[in-house]
């Protein structure tokens, strides 16, 4: 088992290892005042692991209530958020109790936002069951739901009380979802450079990550920890974690969220790196190595939408402010920069990135 300690406004541990779901009950019971846990999951994940998680909680002497909603980004919305809050109220949850998010990024985002707002704040536990949520989304305290006009437009910063990454749960991931997580891992490799980047370059695709899950997830969590501890509320250096996200989020939204998040990030990284190379910010060798890595992992390196389609969506991005948006631009693996770009100039960046 690997442990990474996060020292944010609320300190907590991220535990990474096989079989940790069976320790959920004892670890939840150790949180002061917890007597009841609302276990939140989607229908797919609950069918696989819901009863196992609930039984662990019951064996530790905790009362368990459940809230299960349909899977998919389309259900990370205000309506389901309201239903979750009503379920918590009906279950008699108090401010010293806890929510537990069993699932991927959608479940974690929704549960975390509900926890941030129920009775003005209740603790929650992250139980990530996807590579993407284990390596990234479950750590750092960003919580949100979507609006019809944009992703993650309503949210709050609310750190979890505990994160348990049971790597055994990743064994049931569909290949497309595992590859989506690989997209986020490659993002961290571009941010960090060095050993992580070279290690991924030595892998023959996703099987390499699957064979080294604990170490890869631990390294990604350590990197995210460093950004979060330096800039918990995303006003400075933490923005660099949005590498690939501005253009990727646009593609994700236009697909009706059928394009998995990590695949969208991969495509967004390819577009911004092409544009950076064309404009002299990025070394051509960096672009070549990134595209080779994406190809080896079977991840997309282009966005299947036109600039005309993407621009209205990007204008509504939550990172847009005062007619500008901040683009995260890679230079070499291990060094990126944030550039403030006027929104009308985005068309040129997209064109240079291969989007017509």
Image (cartoon, rainbow, N blue to C red):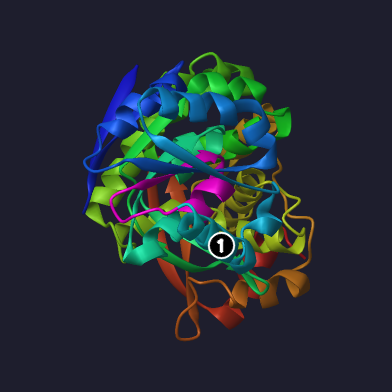
Report the magenta residues as a range: 92-111
Asked if residue 242 is among those painted magenta in the image, a careful observer would answer no
Give the residue pinned by disc 1. Answer: 81
Mark 1 crowd level (few <14, some 14–19, many ≥20, 10 Å Cα):
some
| Secondary element at tag 1 | helix
**Residue 186 seen by the camera:** no
Q: How many marks?
A: 1
Residue at 66%, 23% in the rendered image: 172
- In the image, taking residue 347 as reference, residue 170 lies left or right, namely left
Please provide percent x and percent y for residue 289: 56, 35
Please provide percent x and percent y for residue 277: 55, 53
- In the image, taking residue 154 as reference, residue 262 lies left or right, namely right
Task: Tell me the quarter of the picture where residue 353 sits.
Answer: bottom right
Please provide percent x and percent y for residue 284: 55, 45
**Residue 207 seen by the camera:** yes
Residue at 59%, 68% in the rendered image: 78
Q: Nearer the viewer, residue 189 or 52?
A: 52
Please provide percent x and percent y for residue 104: 56, 41
């Amino acid at each position: 088992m690997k442990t990474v300690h996060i020292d944010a406004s609320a300190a907590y541990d991220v535990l990474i290892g096989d079989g940790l779901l069976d320790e959920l009950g004892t670890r939840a019971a150790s949180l002061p005042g917890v007597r009841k846990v609302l276990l939140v999951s989607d229908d797919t994940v609950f069918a696989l692991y819901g009863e196992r998680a609930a039984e662990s909680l019951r064996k530790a002497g905790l009362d368990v209530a459940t809230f299960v909603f349909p899977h998919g980004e389309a259900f990370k919305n205000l309506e389901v958020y309201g239903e979750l809050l009503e379920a918590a109220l009906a279950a008699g949850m108090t401010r010293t109790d806890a929510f537990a998010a069993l699932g991927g990024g959608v479940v974690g985002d929704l549960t975390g936002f509900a926890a941030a707002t129920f009775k003005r704040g209740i603790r929650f536990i992250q139980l990530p069951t996807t590579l993407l949520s284990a390596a990234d989304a479950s750590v750092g305290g960003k919580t949100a739901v979507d609006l019809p006009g944009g992703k993650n437009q309503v949210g709050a910063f609310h750190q979890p009380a505990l994160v348990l990454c049971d790597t055994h749960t990743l064994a049931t991931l569909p290949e497309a979802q595992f590859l989506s997580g690989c997209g986020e891992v490659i993002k961290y490799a571009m941010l960090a450079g060095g050993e992580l980047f070279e290690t991924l370059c030595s892998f023959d695709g996703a099987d390499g990550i699957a064979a080294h899950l604990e170490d890869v997830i631990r390294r990604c969590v350590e990197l995210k920890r460093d950004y979060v501890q330096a800039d918990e509320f995303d006003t400075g250096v933490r923005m660099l974690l949005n590498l690939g996200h501005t253009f990727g989020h646009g593609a994700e939204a236009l697909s009706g969220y059928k394009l998995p998040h990590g695949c969208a990030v991969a495509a967004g990284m390819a577009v911004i790196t092409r544009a950076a190379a064309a404009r002299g910010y990025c070394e051509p060798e960096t672009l070549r190595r990134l595209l080779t890595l994406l190809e080896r992992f079977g991840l997309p390196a282009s966005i299947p939408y036109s600039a005309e389609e993407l621009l209205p969506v990007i204008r509504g991005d939550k990172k847009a402010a005062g007619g500008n948006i901040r683009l995260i631009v890679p230079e070499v693996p291990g060094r990126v920069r944030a550039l403030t770009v006027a929104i009308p100039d985005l068309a040129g960046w997209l064109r240079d990135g291969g989007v017509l």
